[in-house]
Amino acid sequence: MFDSRIRRGAVPVSNESAEHVIVVHGIWMRGIAMLPLARRLRSAGFSVETFDYRSVTGEWNGSLERLRERWRQQSAGRVHVVGHSLGGMLALDLATQDADLPAGRIVCLGSPLRGSTAASRLQGLPGGRLLMGKSASILHEGLQAWNGARDVGVIAGSTPIGLGALIAPLERPHDGTVSVAETRLPGVSDHCVVECTHTGLLFSAEVASLAAGFLRSGRF
């Protein structure tokens, strides 16, 4: 059952962990977009690296394999992944397919795990399929319920400002691109909602704090 609650105050984190975190960007972005979040996670005591992939022109299975290789390179200790939007879907899809990856937790930030209404609507507009590229199918269909042993946490935004809301009538609450309902994948360990836009999830000190706390404890 989801423990979904509105979060307003940042949660302090300690500087004790040396566990590794891979941060993964969403569609139409590159790894540089994850640097503000990466810096905050480093300040929280984690070693952090960014993972870059071609979210539009790259084959989904190819991106999965590259992330698998990166994940396995960190063989010592726990390896966590924090993915924004499509990046969270990439991490979770890989963890579903490969149960032998190094131990660690996954945090999805604003990921439309049950499929994206905005992405589905965009595909029907002129040039939409070109804009979505190779990610069109996964964003339209979403993922199956999570039933793996790995802890998975989801942070959703509820500030309704973004282009997605102009493309499609999103169910409220939403972050301007993804509705909170679209982030509620059955089987995940924990779920919370913050007052943030979709892109703002990457720049929020509160979100970074919540993510760090989940990576340590498996709960928000």
Image (cartoon, rainbow, N blue to C red):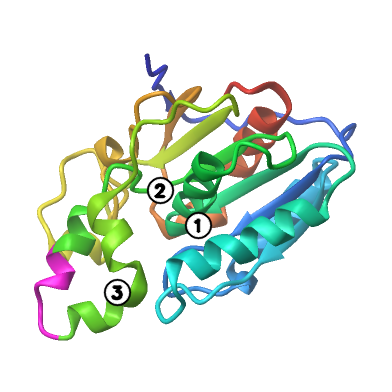
Picture coordinates of residue 2 (x, y %)?
38, 18
Q: CA distance from mark 3 to mark 1?
A: 14 Å
Q: Which residue is mark 1?
A: 87
Name the amino acid, label 2. Ser
Tell me if residue 12 comes above or below residue 39 in the rendering: above
Q: Which mark is residue 177?
A: none
- Do the residues bearing badges 1 and 2 touch, measured as CB atoms within 8 Å? yes
Image spot of residue 86 (x, y percent): 43, 58
Residue 34: x, y in percent? 62, 63
In terms of secondary structure, where does tag 2 sit? loop
Tell me where the magenta segment starts and ends, as one range. 121-126
Q: Nearer the viewer, residue 198 or 2?
A: 2
Neighbours of disc 2 within 10 Å: few (<14), some (14-19), many (20+): many
**Among the 4 quarters of the image, the one containing residue 157:** top left
Q: Which residue is mark 3?
A: 132
**Nearer the observer, 52 or 15:** 52
Q: Is residue 184 above or below residue 113?
A: above
- Identify the residue shown where x is 70% and y is 35%: 104
- Real-space CA distance between mark 1 and mark 2, rounded to the nearest whole angstrom: 8 Å
**To which residue does mark 2 refer?**
111
Residue 40: x, y in percent? 73, 50
First along the sequence among labels 2 and 3: 2
